[in-house]
Amino acid sequence: TGTKVYTSSTFGSPLLSQFTMSTAWDIKTISPTGNLDVSTQFSYCSGIELSSDGTKAIVVGGKSGAFLIARYDLSTAWDLSTGTYVGQSAVTAPGGVRFNPDGTRLYLLNGNTPDTIEIYHLSTPYDIVNKGPVQSTAVLETVTGDNQILGFSFNYDGSKMFATGISGASVYEFRLSTAWDLSTLEYQTALYVGSRLANPSDAYIDANLENLIVSGGSDDKLYQYRLNSRAQGTATIT
């Protein structure tokens, strides 16, 4: 609905944070509404995704030299403060994490060279503990020319994907001719955001493909863009 923002902490305390926008997709109306301490499992987090019904939070990151993906179940949907740890499994150099709507496909950014999205098929939705082997991959570095992809996200129906990269300080747009199928991924264009943030870490698009929200940088801010226009606003998310 565009009223919630969830962030993970790469630096400092390993907290998952939650924010609410009183006006959907308007970051100028954002305010903090809760968090979840995941320091028992992580010393840093590099990505978070919530299930389509808001009852599960999937987190990637690391601790003590190990890379992990973990699940937390929320007793109140969309409320991180009600999260309880369920389980975890090992992954490789994780960046962003996403799922298809029914939770049977896990998309995980592997930050090793070349930057690649790994796809897992889950027999039980959102069961990352028993995720099995990688089923297929999509290499982003080759098509974007950016060797530091940090995050990615899909639009609501899986027909578009947006990835963020540090080398080009850009958001890269892709089209999927078959929804959620990365074997049909086709690079479209790039939006340079380096004049405002040098290290874009993730990007989110609304259902109408009009509002693009980009996170990243060292100033703990979100940046909002109207497509085909300049940045429309910023919001601090500390």
Image (cartoon, rainbow, N blue to C red):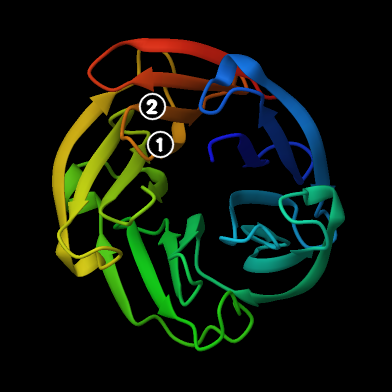
Seen at 78% across and 74% down, the residue is: 86
Residue 41 or 176: which is nearer the viewer?
Answer: 176
Earlier along the polypeptide chain: callout 1 or callout 2? Answer: 1
Q: Quick one: SS at disc 2?
A: strand
Residue underneath mark 1:
206
Circle 2 residues within 10 Å: few <14, some 14–19, many ≥20 = some
Residue underneath mark 2:
211
Residue 237 or 116: which is nearer the viewer?
Answer: 237
Q: Is residue 226 left or right of residue 143?
A: right
Where residue 61 sits in the image (x, y, percent)?
63, 57
- The CA distance from mark 1 to mark 2 is 6 Å
- Height in image: 194 above or below 102? above
- Height in image: 82 above or below 32? below
Seen at 69% across and 68% down, the residue is: 71
Question: Which image quarter: residue 18?
Answer: top right
Seen at 28% across and 30% down, the residue is: 168
Asked whether residue 238 appears in the rendered view, the answer is: no
For the C terminus, the quadrant is top right
- Height in image: 135 above or below 102? below
Amino acid at dot 1: Asp
Where residue 31 sits in the image (x, y, percent)?
73, 23
- Height in image: 186 above or below 208? below
Q: Quick one: SS at disc 1?
A: loop
Tell me, yes or no, whether the two marked residues, 1 and 2, touch with CB atoms within 8 Å.
Answer: yes
Question: Which image quarter: residue 213?
Answer: top left
Amino acid at dot 2: Asn
For the N terminus, the quadrant is top right
